[in-house]
Image (cartoon, helix red, strand yellow):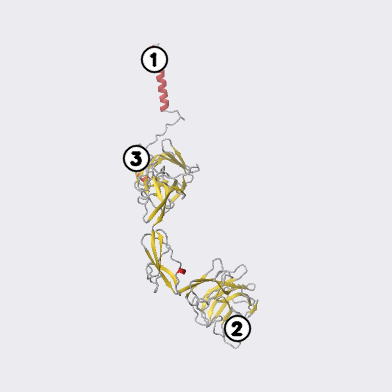
Amino acid sequence: MKVRNILIGLLVVLMAFVFISCEDEPEEGGQTPAVQVDDTIYKFTTTKGVSDGVFSHDKFSVRFNEAVEEGETISFEFRSTVDFFQVSVRSIEGSTKYVYEQDIKDDGTNSFTLEPLSDGWTKFSYTFAENAAASKDFRIDLRGWLATGDVMEFRHVFYAGEQLALSAESMGSYGAPTMEVVEDSQWDETDNKIVAIFIGKPDSADKYPVVESVAKGGKATLSGLVKDNYNLMNVYWYDKSGNKGEVFNKDTDVIEADTFLLAEWKGVDVDITFHKNYLGAENEELVTTTEVGKAITPPATDDWERDGWKITGWTTAAVATEDNVFDDNAPVASTDAIEIYAQWSNVATLTLNMNYGAVPATKEIDVTIGEAPVGVAQVGRPGYLLSGWTVGPASDSGAYDYNSVVTGDKTIYAQWVEPEHTYELTSTIAVEAIKIPADSSNNYTNKYYQFRWRDNDTNVPNRAGGQLLAGDVISFMVKFTPVEGSAAPDTVILLDKDSGAIYSGSFGPADANGWISFSYTLTAQPGAQGLKMKIQRGASGSPAIEVGDKLEFKGLSLNGVALALATDNTKNGLYEGCKPELLVK
């Protein structure tokens, strides 16, 4: 019996030995022992709220010195005093490259996973869908609302199946964090919960920053909710998307997480005095009030009548300088009383609205109040003639006499009509050079169409005194039909009576019907009375106008008044050149 028991005992020992040997040395194809996981905890703590201690929307940033490969996975476990609302993964080399950036959603549609663990940690993982292998490293940003003392802890950081260690250099500079390596952390979920009170949206630049630390489940005192020169009217629940909720009650409402509140303020009243500011009205003023934070609206100028004068602006001193111009768009910043002074002028602005096109052009002229404009309105519209002026854009809005006395700033609107006649001219000269008259020493070639406008060989028609002036507008529409094989004229030249140059340039493109618009405003007064115009090929007039070349005009005008064409070359209209035949249509 003893021998039998001994044999059984040896057999058990032998089997145990074999079993242990099998565990230590697995057979080929068997399981490999699991890799030992390092449970080190990396604890980062902010030493200041971002932006020099002001509570702000920012992030914990962790940098990994690893190249990114498509299909590889980054994962880690974390816990924090901050409630994060956005995650971004960026590859970094030179300029930052976003791999993705996404708000944390509750509907399961995130590109990453956030898995709550049983011990209070959360596991983050993301598989790179984009190849960014050229990057030297990459970083992960967890975006929330950081304040001094906020904590972020990491553990079990893996990339491509290998565990990574973190260091102080791994952490971004946001919030100036410190780092501790700890074996265990006594975690208090009520630490450092933040109440943020803003004016405007939480992520806008016009926030009024206030930070208050409140234990989770506690109440806010709002004792720091103070703003110079403002009275607090109400506080509301708020969210980062800009939605205002119910009124916040600091005595009953409980703070369960990082919370946004919206404060509504009313500026303190400020006294404003407007002074009329001219001799004889030293004591005439208007006293009113406005609020801090609001702009000041000057009184309507029509309410302060002064015969022959208009208000041109406002200053913060009686004598205007460049440094004391009053800005009526600037909000009042203090409670100090404000004195504002009117500045006057006896010159009004008469605005001439051309009243055609998608954005009508305008022209402003200065007129002494109580007087009429000097001269004619210098305006033009290619292909049209000026029929008059109205007080509004519509032709039936009421006529306005351009020569009437001006009492203040005013805008008037041009009304245009199509011309009654168009002119068709066809070149008739068949020789290269002729003499006109036959016994003259003057040689003329058929290089151009030439026109002149003179009254009694001296004065420009439609103009008292006959002199062209700076600002005069010459306009027309022209259409060319050259003979077969001939190029259309492309150059217009304007000259004064003595052939002094006024303008030389090319025509623009034609419209769908072949008409070309031309308009030119004289930049200086010509040296001599009278006006000449040439239309030709090129600046030198070469090649010449061919026999049969046809030119058509409509709306040929000076300041909107028709310039006539006639065959009498001693007065207005056609001159020598190519001696075209005229047809009035």
- Mark in the foreground, 1 or 3: 3
Query: Which residue is label 1 attached to?
Result: 6
In the image, what residue type sits under mark 2?
Asn
Separation of marks 2 and 3 at Cα, in angstroms: 104 Å
Separation of marks 1 and 3 at Cα, in angstroms: 55 Å
User: Is 298 situated left or right of 387 in this image?
Assistant: left
Q: Quadrant of residue 335?
A: bottom left
Instruction: Identify the secondary structure beneath mark 3.
Output: strand
Separation of marks 1 and 2 at Cα, in angstroms: 148 Å
Q: Which mark is on residue 181?
A: 3
In the image, what residue type sits under mark 3?
Val
Query: Which residue is label 2 attached to?
Result: 569
- Tell which circle, 1 or 3, labels the residue nearer the N-terminal end: 1
Residue 425 x, y percent position in the rendering:
63, 77
Q: Is residue 433 visible?
A: yes
Instruction: Identify the secondary structure beneath mark 2.
Output: loop
Residue at 60 percent across and 71 percent down: it is 515
